[in-house]
Image: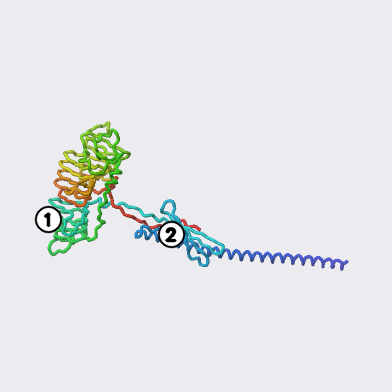
């Protein structure tokens, strides 16, 4: 019996041994499979890391290209970031980089892509790289400015008589100063010549009250013998700051009369006349809807009221009180927008006109004033003028014929008599002020002849519609890349 049991146990042991061997075999196989999988994953992860590194490297190429183009734009306005995909160093793999501009026109998305083996990774970042912006240069409208420039020995601008000029003045060419200058700034692009050195009638500033800034690009003539150039410390020139470098680039803004003629609405072009019932005089803007200086002398201030309107543009004259028509006060002008008259403008009589609004009035020919006429933005006609609320600019093309091939040769803009003017003035040719005439606004002209009252200049705070300005192209620095992802 015992022998039979022992014999049975031998059979059980065999079965257990076989089962143990089978389990070990299965475990060994599973371990081999895990090792194989880990090896594969390790290789795949290494490929991904290399692909990612290549993508980052390629993104750097894209960023360098976009930022480089932005930095070069001031010298090369046509510089543009890369177009299309370009290859970059793959470090054993392959790489691409490119950039796309968003719909706003300034935001660039820069891309880098790397491939190593069968693995591809892509990363990107964004940057704000502004396109060129056109900037209006309005600084010249804060001066009396003369644009003509001639060889030394010629007086491009003359300030004479008993006039004391106490407003900022800028002359592109040569200035002949026969009277006293006490304005805060004087800039001369050519030669400065002083021809009267009396303590009250000539010179620049005084030893006790020097002007703030004097800039003369050329030489100084008429200084006290032995004192040399304009040093601002010797008679008859006294200035706190003296320089040969001008504070602005002197340039008269271009006057595009054909475009202004066509665009003014209400205006002289066909289809741009005043609305029915406006009350304007016959041939108000022009007599033939053609730019040819044919409308004679414009009657801007007739004895009857008128109101010419198109949208937000309005030119309204109240010669008399008519409350129902919105004329609460006589001799008032409302001017909002740009208006063009194909003739000459003559302002005379003993009328004091008060205007409101922001506007420009163009004439093809000349502008002249006489008598006791005044046109002001404030009733007191003084420094209380707030140029952020009311500004009027008068602009003269100075045509002396029908084509503009000949310009008015003697005082295209002439303010004389005892006028008081609170307007900005632009003359394609010469500007003249004399007698007891007073002008509170900036003046831009080819040449200046100043013999009137220039006691103060009120700078313009805004530019009325249609005011000519110089422009420049500005490029803002590119911003740092943001929104990185990959």
Q: Position of residue 124 (x, y in %)?
A: 48, 58
Labels 2 and 1 touching (C-beta < 8 A):
no
**Within 10 Å of the Cα at label 2, are there few (<14), some (14-19), or many (20+) other Cα atoms?**
some
Which of the numbered marks, if any, corresponds to residue 311?
none
**Within 10 Å of the Cα at label 1, are there few (<14), some (14-19), or many (20+) other Cα atoms?**
some
* Quarter assignment of residue 126: bottom left
Residue at image coords 49%, 59%: 123
Tell me the quadrant of the picture where the N terminus can be found. Answer: bottom right
> Residue reaching furthest top?
324
User: Mark 2 or mark 1: which is in front?
Assistant: 2
Residue 443 appearing in the image: no
Q: Secondary structure at mark 2?
A: loop
* Quarter assignment of residue 70: bottom left
**In the foreground, 486 or 207:** 486
> Residue reaching furthest right?
1
Q: Position of residue 357 (x, y in %)?
A: 27, 41
Residue beneath disc 2: 82
Q: Tell me which numbered mark, 2 or 1, is placed earlier along the sequence.
A: 2
How much space separates mark 2 and mark 1, taking CA atoms?
66 Å
Q: Position of residue 82 (x, y in %)?
A: 43, 59
Q: Secondary structure at mark 1?
A: loop
Left or right: residue 49 compared with residue 223:
right
Residue 257 appearing in the image: yes
Residue beneath disc 1: 199
């Amino acid at each position: 019996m015992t022998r039979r049991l022992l014999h049975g146990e031998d059979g059980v042991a065999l079965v257990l041994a076989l089962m143990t061997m089978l389990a070990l075999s299965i475990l060994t196989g599973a371990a081999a499979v895990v090792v194989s999988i880990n090896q594969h994953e390790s290789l795949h992860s290494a490929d991904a890391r290399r692909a990612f590194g290549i993508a980052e490297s390629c993104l750097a190429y894209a960023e360098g290209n976009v930022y480089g183009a932005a930095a070069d734009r001031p010298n090369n306005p046509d510089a543009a970031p890369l177009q299309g995909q370009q290859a970059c160093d793959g470090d054993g793999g392959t790489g691409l980089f490119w950039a796309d501009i968003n719909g706003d026109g300034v935001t660039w998305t820069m891309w880098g892509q790397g491939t190593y083996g069968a693995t591809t990774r892509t990363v990107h970042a964004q940057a704000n790289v502004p396109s060129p912006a056109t900037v209006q240069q309005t600084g010249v409208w804060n001066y009396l400015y003369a644009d003509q420039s001639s060889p030394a020995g010629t007086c491009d601008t003359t300030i004479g008589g008993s006039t004391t000029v106490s407003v900022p003045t800028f002359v592109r060419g040569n200035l002949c100063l026969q009277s006293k200058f006490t304005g805060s700034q004087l800039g001369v692009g050519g030669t400065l010549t002083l021809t009267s050195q009396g303590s009250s009638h000539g010179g620049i500033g005084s030893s006790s009250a020097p002007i703030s800034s004097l800039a003369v690009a050329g030489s100084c003539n008429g200084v006290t013998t032995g004192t040399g150039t304009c040093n601002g410390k010797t008679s008859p020139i006294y200035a706190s700051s003296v320089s040969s470098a001008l504070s602005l680039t002197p340039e008269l803004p271009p006057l595009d009369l054909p475009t202004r003629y066509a665009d003014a609405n209400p205006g002289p072009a066909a289809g741009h006349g005043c609305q029915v019932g406006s009350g304007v005089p016959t041939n108000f803007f022009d007599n033939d809807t053609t730019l040819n200086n044919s409308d004679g002398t414009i009657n801007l201030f007739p004895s009857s009221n008128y109101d010419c309107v198109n949208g937000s543009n309005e030119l309204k004259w109240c010669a008399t009180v008519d409350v129902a028509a919105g004329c609460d006060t006589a001799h008032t002008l409302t001017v909002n927008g740009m208006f063009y008259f194909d003739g000459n403008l003559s302002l005379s009589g003993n009328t004091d006109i008060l205007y409101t609004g922001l506007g420009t009035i163009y004439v093809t020919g000349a502008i002249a004033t006489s008598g006791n006429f005044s046109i002001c933005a404030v009733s007191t006609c003084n420094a209380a003028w707030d140029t952020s609320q009311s500004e009027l600019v008068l602009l003269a093309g100075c045509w002396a014929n029908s084509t503009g091939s000949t310009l008015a040769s003697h005082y295209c803009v002439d303010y004389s008599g005892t006028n008081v003017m609170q307007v900005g003035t632009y003359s394609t040719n010469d500007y003249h002020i004399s007698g007891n005439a007073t002008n509170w606004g900036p003046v831009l002209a080819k040449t200046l002849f100043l013999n009137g009252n220039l006691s103060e200049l009120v700078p313009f705070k805004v530019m009325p519609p249609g005011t000519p300005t110089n422009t420049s192209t500005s490029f803002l620095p590119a911003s740092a890349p943001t929104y990185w992802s990959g």
